[in-house]
Image (cartoon, rainbow, N blue to C red):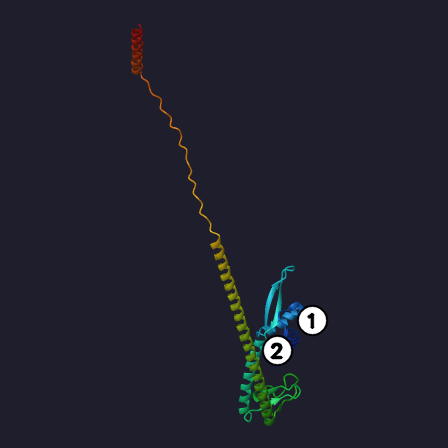
Amino acid sequence: MLVELVKEVAGADTLKVLEILKNKKNVSEFKIAEKLGISVNQVRNIIYRMQEHNLVTFTRKKDSDKGWYIYYWTFDMPRAIMLIADMKNKSIGDAKENLLHVEDTRVYVCKNCRLKFPEMDALEMQFLCETCGEIMLEEDSAKRKKDLSKRLKKDEEDLKVANEILMSHREMIAKSAEKQMIKEKAEKDIKRKTARELAKKTAKTTKKVVSKPKKKIKKTVKKPPVKKKPIKTTKKTSKKSAKKTVKKRILRRVFNH
């Protein structure tokens, strides 16, 4: 089913790349080229056709030595299954429509190429195959009805399988997301617990060690000595003092004699 899809949408040469990418992640384009014995440009050409239908995803890393980017490819299985489901739904709708009008329409087939054409297309080609030039013959309606019923049954089975794969993939994603949430919650709880324990330890240590407040030392500022102002003597005061001293001397002499 997967091989048919890739072959139909991207070409038969992409199947060899599919075998390398299947069930692997981030495969280097240089490794693919080495395994297939082709150039990197040829690998890119094949992968780009798959990328047009979103069948592959990539990451790129810069080579520190050479300076260019190296691409790493992964086959996108969920996207491929979704594409298969879409194609099968379309094929089922076409088969049911053709079964309703199988008796009213004519189809011409080339036995060599096994290509089928509606009556109007075959008429434009003059009932000659464009590929090999062989004359096309009308297909039996009973056989065509049988082939359509067979194809319809196969498409319905393939669609059922595709839906089951998609359902299991979604359940797997939901479980992994739930596990991730539980893991993140557990990590947060551990961080909160350690933070609380650390806070308790710091609170205990601060109670034991009480830091005494430092006494403020008053700085005594020495005042500069006050300079005494010299007594100003005037001429009048000096004369008076001189007279007093003279009187004192005279009195002493008088009393001594």
Q: Is residue 43 left or right of residue 184?
A: right
Residue 77 seen in render: yes
Residue 122 seen in render: no
Element type at marker 2?
helix
Percent position of residue 112, x then y = 67, 87
Above or below 19: residue 243: above
Whichever of labels 1 and 2 marks the residue nearer the N terminus, that label is: 2
Local packing at callout 2 (Cα closer than 10 Å; few below 14, some 14-19, many 20+) is many
Percent position of residue 115, x then y = 62, 86
Residue receiving disc 2: 6
Q: Residue at x 51, y 68 (%)?
A: 185
Residue 64 occupies quadrant = bottom right
Cα gap from disc 1 to disc 2, whole angstroms: 20 Å
Above or below 56: residue 86: below
Residue contact at pointers 1 and 2, CB within 8 angstroms: no
Q: Amino acid at mark 2?
A: Val
Above or below 111: residue 214: above
Q: Is residue 51 left or right of residue 224?
A: right
Element type at marker 1?
helix
Above or below 4: residue 47: above
Residue receiving disc 1: 35
Most extreme residue toward the right, as rendered? 37
Residue 180, numbered circle? none
Percent position of residue 63, x then y = 63, 61
Most extreme residue toward the top, as rendered? 257
Q: Which of the two marks, 1 or 2, is nearer to us in this view?
A: 1
* Viewport quadrant of the C terminus: top left
